Image (cartoon, rainbow, N blue to C red):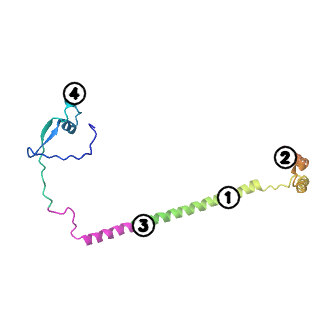
Amino acid sequence: MGNAPSNRRVTVVNDDVVGVVQVSESVVRRLRGLPDKPATDSERGSSQEPLVSQPIPEVAHRPPPSYIPFAPPEPYSSTLEQRQKYHEEFKKAEKSWNNRIHELETQNRLLFETVSDKFTATVKEIEENHIKNSYAPVCPDKQQQVSKCYKENSKYPLNCSREVNDFMECVDKVRMTALSK
């Protein structure tokens, strides 16, 4: 209550004086944005607040305008002209964007060709420098023994642990000789 806005509808019937509405003092204070006065004990006992007469200002009635705010003289021709102008501007913008898209596609194609050429040259360089060395299989006889053992003992692969250890020792010896070179 108090400063909170109210959504109540109020109907005022004024039988006394024309142009004057009687309002309570608390309503006047609320309309002026002043805080409500606390009610004293004597005022709490009474059910009605004292009324204050406030004159209602006269509202000046304006006559309706005698002209229409917006009425183009030739609505069809101006609309047609506006459409033609819009279509011309649209075609210009479309042509501009199509040119821009074509330029970007050309730049993209050139960039792709350049990057593709660099990639091919890099792959060729790596192949020449690093992959040209081919190696012979390491310990082929031990590898065959391991494969044979796994085939014979497919249900019991742990039976091949001796062959696997022999193969690993052979690979370690070859690795150590290659690193010592």
Q: Name the quadrant of the N terminus.
A: top left
Q: CA distance from mark 2 to mark 4?
A: 108 Å
Q: Relative to 24, is 157 on the left or the right?
A: right
Residue for badge 1: 121
Q: Secondary structure at mark 4?
A: helix
Q: Which residue is mark 2?
A: 175
> Counting other residues with Cα less than 10 Å from the Cα at mark 1, is it few (<14), some (14-19), or many (20 or more)?
few
Q: Is residue 75 magenta?
A: yes
Mark 2 in CB contact with mark 1 (< 8 angstroms): no
Which residue lies at the image location 40% right of the left edge and 65% below the top edge?
93
Query: For mark 3, does the 10 Å Cα neighbourhood hold few (<14), some (14 to 19), or many (20 or more) residues?
Result: few
**Amino acid type indicated by mark 1:** Ala
Disc assigned to residue 6: none
| Disc on the earlier residue, 2 or 3 | 3
> What is the secondary structure assignment of the residue under circle 3?
helix
Residue with the mark numbered 3? 94
Horizontal relation, residue 36 to residue 103: left or right:
left
Disc 4 target residue: 41
